[in-house]
Image (cartoon, coloured by chain):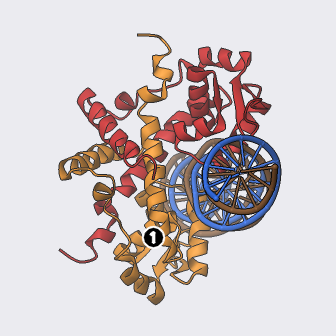
Chain colours: A orange, B red, C brown, D blue
DNA sequence: GTAAAATATGTCGCACACGATATAATTTAG
DNA sequence: CTAAATTATATCGTGTGCGACATATTTTAC
C-alpha cells in the first residue's frame, strides 16, 4: 500500500462518477437534438412538466444548480417559447416561471426520448435499483451544506 | 402507471448521476484550489503521475474525453509548467506529453487532496464498493462505441 | 508509386457550471 | 420606524465538454 495509491484514477470514486455522467449525457444528446433541447434544458423542462409553475429558487434546489447556471438557461428556454418569466406580484424578488402551451406540447415529443440507462449499458434491474439508491443517498446527504 | 412517468426526474437514472458528479466536483474544487488546478486538470495530472509520458490519444481514452476538451487543457497545464508537449519523432501526428519536475513535485502536495467520497457522503464500505463496480460496468460497456 | 482512406490533432462556436461580486426587495432587530 | 441582515436573482470571467469542421501525417490499395 503506497501513500500515492489514492492518486490513482482507478482508486477514486470521483472519476467513474464524472466519466459516467458524461457518457450518459452523450447518449442523450442525439435524442434531445430532435427537441432542440440541451440536456440541462431538458431536465429543466422535466421539472416544468411536473410542476407547471415554479420560481427560480425551487428550480435551483430541484436540479442542485446555482442561479448563475439557471438564469441564462431559462432565458434560452423563454426565447424558444417553452416558458414565460415574470416577477412575482407578492414578493418582487421572486421570479415566476410558467410553462407555455408550446412547452406542454413538447412533452408529447419528449415521451420517446429517455433511453433506459439500465438497458443501454447492460445493467440488471437489481444493479439499476442499487445504483439509484446509492446515488440518491449521496445527493440527499447534508442537503443544506 | 402513466405514460409520462418516465419524464419524472425521480424516475431517471441520468439525473442523480449528473447531479452527484457535480456535487463531487464542488467537494473537490476548494481542495484543488491550493494546487491551482481545476478538477479536469487534476485528473490529467493523475494520469501523468502514473504514466509520466503519454500521447494525447491515450489521455483521451483514459479520461473518456475528446481532443477538443483535452487540447486546450494540456495547453494550460503546459503554461503552468507541469507538463511538456512535443511532436513524436517517429510518428509526427502524435503529441508526446511528458511530466516535468514541477509536475512531479505537485504530487507531494496532491496526496492530501482526495477526500474519501464514501466518508464525505456517509456511504458504507459496501456501498462504495458496489457503486464503484456498477459505475465501471457502465464505463467499460461497449468501449469502442 | 501514388491516390485514397485512416489517424491524430487543432480550431470554432455554443452551452453549461462555477466562485466572486453586485443589486434590489424583504425581513428583522433595536 | 429605520438601519442592518437576509433573501432572490443577475452579471462577470474562467474553464470545461461537445459537434462540426479543418489540417497534417501515415497507411493502405491498386
At numbered mark 1, what does the secondary structure look like: helix, strand or loop? helix
How far from the left and from the top, in percent, is residue A47? 40, 69
How far from the left and from the top, in percent, is residue A120? 33, 57
Total marks placed: 1
| Residue drawn at point x = 46 percent, y = 83 percent | A103
User: Left of B76 or right of it: where is B58?
Assistant: left
Residue D16, compared with residue A29, is above or below; it is: above
Residue B128, compared with residue A22, is above or below; it is: above
Q: Nearer the viewer, residue A70 or B78?
A: B78
| Residue drawn at point x = 43 percent, y = 55 percent | A24
User: Left of B123 or right of it: where is C27?
Assistant: right
| Residue drawn at point x = 28 percent, y = 58 percent | A119
Residue A104, compared with residue B23, is above or below; it is: below
Is residue B132 visible to the viewer in this orientation of the structure? yes
Is residue A145 visible to the viewer in this orientation of the structure? no
| Residue drawn at point x = 43 percent, y = 51 percent | B19
User: Left of C15 or right of it: where is A5?
Assistant: left
Q: Quadrant of residue A130?
A: top left
Residue beneath label 1, please?
A31
Q: Nearer the viewer, residue B97 or B128?
A: B97
User: Left of A137 or right of it: where is B68?
Assistant: right
Amino acid at each position: 500500500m503506497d501513500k500515492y495509491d489514492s492518486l490513482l484514477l482507478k482508486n477514486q470514486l470521483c472519476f467513474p462518477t464524472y466519466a459516467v455522467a458524461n457518457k450518459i449525457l452523450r447518449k442523450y444528446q442525439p435524442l434531445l437534438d430532435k427537441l432542440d433541447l440541451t440536456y440541462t434544458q431538458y431536465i429543466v423542462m422535466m421539472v416544468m412538466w411536473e410542476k407547471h409553475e415554479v420560481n427560480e429558487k425551487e428550480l435551483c434546489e430541484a436540479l442542485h444548480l446555482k442561479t448563475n447556471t439557471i438564469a441564462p438557461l431559462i432565458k434560452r428556454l423563454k426565447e424558444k417559447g417553452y416558458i414565460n418569466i415574470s416577477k412575482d406580484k407578492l414578493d418582487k424578488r421572486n421570479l415566476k416561471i410558467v410553462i407555455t402551451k408550446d412547452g406542454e406540447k413538447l412533452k408529447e415529443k419528449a415521451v420517446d426520448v429517455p433511453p433506459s440507462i439500465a438497458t443501454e449499458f447492460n445493467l440488471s434491474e437489481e444493479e439499476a435499483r442499487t445504483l439509484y439508491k446509492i446515488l440518491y443517498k449521496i445527493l440527499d446527504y447534508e442537503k443544506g451544506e
